Image: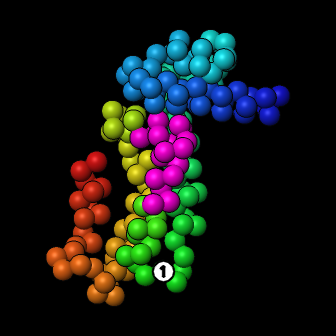
Amino acid sequence: MQVRAARTREAIIRGAAECIDAQGYRGAGLAAIRRSSAVSAGALVFHFRDKSGLAEAVVEAGSATARAVAEPAVREDDSPPRAVGTLLCALTVPLREDVVVRAGALPARERPDIAARRHDAWTPRLTALAAQADTRGELAPGGNPAWSRRWRTVR
């Protein structure tokens, strides 16, 4: 039964992601999500109490994928500026190809209260690389690694 429950939960998250990707968080209704997921209303409410909890699950699933991509993307022998480029390029692939990652960005914008989880998937790595580049004197003239602190307050 646990395997079946996990599959159902994944189907709901993917169905919600498809609806959010197509219509945004506000436009994705629970009835459309249920149809997209091919689950009963009972299954939907069993796994997610409300749309907010479901949006949080979409953001978390997308963040987990981004985190899994971000960590191995950077090689130890890369210079920090090259590693930043590699990291950002690696993160574009799931944004383009994975509806859950893409949809996870939408509720994060419409619901700032859950944005931190999405950004925390990759900003710590990017911040560390900027600090390394600064320490090594590899930033472009006028470059400032403090942008990452401002980023955290703006989002």
Res 106 quadrant in image: top left
In this rendering, position of residue 80 left or right of residue 39: left
Q: What x and y, as percent, mark residue 25?
A: 40, 26
Q: Secondary structure at mark 1?
A: loop
Q: Is residue 121 visible?
A: no
In this picture, residue 145 sits left or right of residue 63: left
Figure quadrant of residue 152: bottom left
Q: Amino acid at mark 1?
A: Asp
Q: Quadrant location of residue 137?
A: bottom left
Look at the magenta stretch and give its main secondary structure.
helix
Q: Which residue is mark 1?
A: 78
Q: Total number of numbered labels? A: 1
Indicate the position of residue 55 as horizontal and vertical percent values: 48, 31
| Span shown in magenta | 89-105
What residue is drawn where x is 62% and y is 11%?
41
Question: Depth check: 52 or 129 in front?
Answer: 129
Question: Does 42 sit above or below residue 15?
Answer: above
Counting from the top left corner in percent of width and height, residue 66 is at 52, 52
Q: Where does residue 60 sit, x and y in percent of width and height?
A: 52, 42
